Image: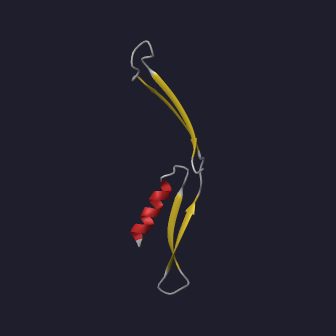
């Protein structure tokens, strides 16, 4: 079922470190096909920097900064 394959690929692609490739190849059995899925993992480490002007007031800071780091697939 093609919809199930498409859903599977979408779920794998949710993690940005996955690089999924799907191909359909002929099988040695008559009237059948092989679905070949390969995944080339990329860098699982992520770093994010942020800056905004949502601070409450000048006493606690008008601007806010943030930094986050993470690892996918643990």
The residue sitting at 50% across, 57% down in the picture is 12
**Against 10, is 3 above or below?**
below
| Residue 67 place in picture, x, y as percent | 53, 31
Task: Tell which of 52 and 20 is nearer to you.
Answer: 52
| Of the pair 65 and 74, the residue shown nearer to us | 74
Q: In the rendered view, does 58 fall on the left or right side of 70?
A: left
Where 40 falls versus 69 (above or below)? below
Spot occupied by residue 35 in the image (x, y as percentages of width and height): 51, 72
Residue 61 position, x and y percent, is 45, 16
Name the residue rendered at 50%, 87% in the picture.
30
Q: Measured along the vertical axis of the image, is residue 57 above or below residue 72? A: above
Residue 62 image position (x, y, % from top left): 42, 17
Q: Is residue 55 left or right of residue 37?
A: left
The quadrant where residue 4 appears:
bottom left
Residue at 59%, 47% in the rendered image? 44
Quarter that holds the N terminus: bottom left
């Amino acid at each position: 079922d093609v919809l199930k394959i498409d859903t599977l690929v979408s779920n794998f692609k949710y993690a940005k470190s996955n690089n999924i490739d799907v191909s359909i190849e002929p099988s040695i059995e008559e009237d059948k096909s092989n679905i070949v899925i390969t995944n080339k993992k990329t860098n699982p480490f992520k770093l994010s920097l942020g800056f905004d002007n949502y601070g409450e007031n000048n006493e606690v800071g008008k601007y806010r900064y943030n930094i986050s780091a993470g690892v996918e697939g643990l």
